[in-house]
Image: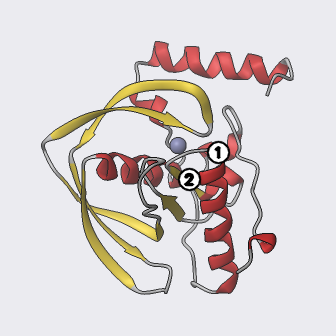
Amino acid sequence: MSAAQMAIKTILTLPDPVLRKTAKPVERVDADLRRLMDDMLLTMYDAPGIGLAAPQIGVLRRLIVMDPAKDDEPKTPLVMVNPEILDRSDEMRTHEEGCLSIPDFTAEIERPAKTRVAYIDREGKKQEAEFEGIWSTLVQHEIDHLNGVLFIDYLSRLKRDMVVRKFTKQKRAGAL
Ligand SMILES: [Zn+2]
């Protein structure tokens, strides 16, 4: 597909209510869905970010794209349709997370260090894979988006409310 046919989508930000909805399963992997995957990857790289879930661009479908490669590293895009966490390790890892829907805010979040995930790939084939390190954090963060969960939900209520209030005020002031 030529770059001209691809489109950078608008990323919804806090406190957009769509970010709190549960996404529906994708029924089939077809040309339209692959176009959506390409648009999501383009939008993610453009932002720039390392992960994006379909609800973040207002599409309530279970689809995520990820690539934690650094700027000077070769790209390693991974697309998952209907991802499902099968298993999580007891061992935890902490990572300073951010989110394209919560710009300019990061926080240290603890999540299982290893995650086993079943998903459907770009070709429509069933896959199963185990992730660790940044990939484990990333896949959990993105799957959370499909269930209306944001990383700030792992913070104390006080801290989370502060973040939400800041974004609500900014939006009301027309700053976003
Ligand atoms: Zn996010």
Asked if labels 1 and 2 touch by Cβ distance under 8 angstroms, the answer is yes
Separation of residues labelled 2 and 1 (CA atoms): 10 Å
170 in relation to 53, above or below: above
* Mark 2: amino acid: Leu
Q: Whole-percent x and y of residue 1?
A: 70, 81
Residue 166 horizontal/vertical position (percent): 66, 16
Query: From the viewer's perspective, is 17 left or right of 147?
Result: right
Quadrant in the picture for the C terminus: top right
- Which residue matches tag 2? 52
Residue 98 left/right relative to 169: left
Residue 99 is left or right of residue 114, and the answer is: right
| Relative image position of residue 168 (x, y in whole percent) | 72, 22
Q: Which of the numbered marks, if any, corresponds to residue 47?
A: 1
- Would the CB of label 2 be found within 8 Å of ligand 1? yes
Residue under the image location 58 percent in, 60 percent down: 23
Q: Earlier in the sequence, mark 2 or mark 1?
A: 1
* Crowd class of label 2 (few under 14; some 14 to 19; many from 20; radius 10 Å): many
The residue furthest front is: 72
Residue 35 lies, with reference to residue 125, above or below; the image says above
Q: Nearer the viewer, mark 2 or mark 1?
A: 1
In the depicted structure, whether residue 16 falls above or below residue 106: below
**Category of crowding for the residue at label 1, using alpha-carbon neighbours closer than 10 angstroms: few (below 14), some (14–19), many (at least 20):** some
Is 147 positioned to the left or the right of 166 in the image? left
Q: Position of residue 51 (x, y in %)?
A: 50, 51
Q: How many marks?
A: 2
**Amino acid at circle 1:** Ala
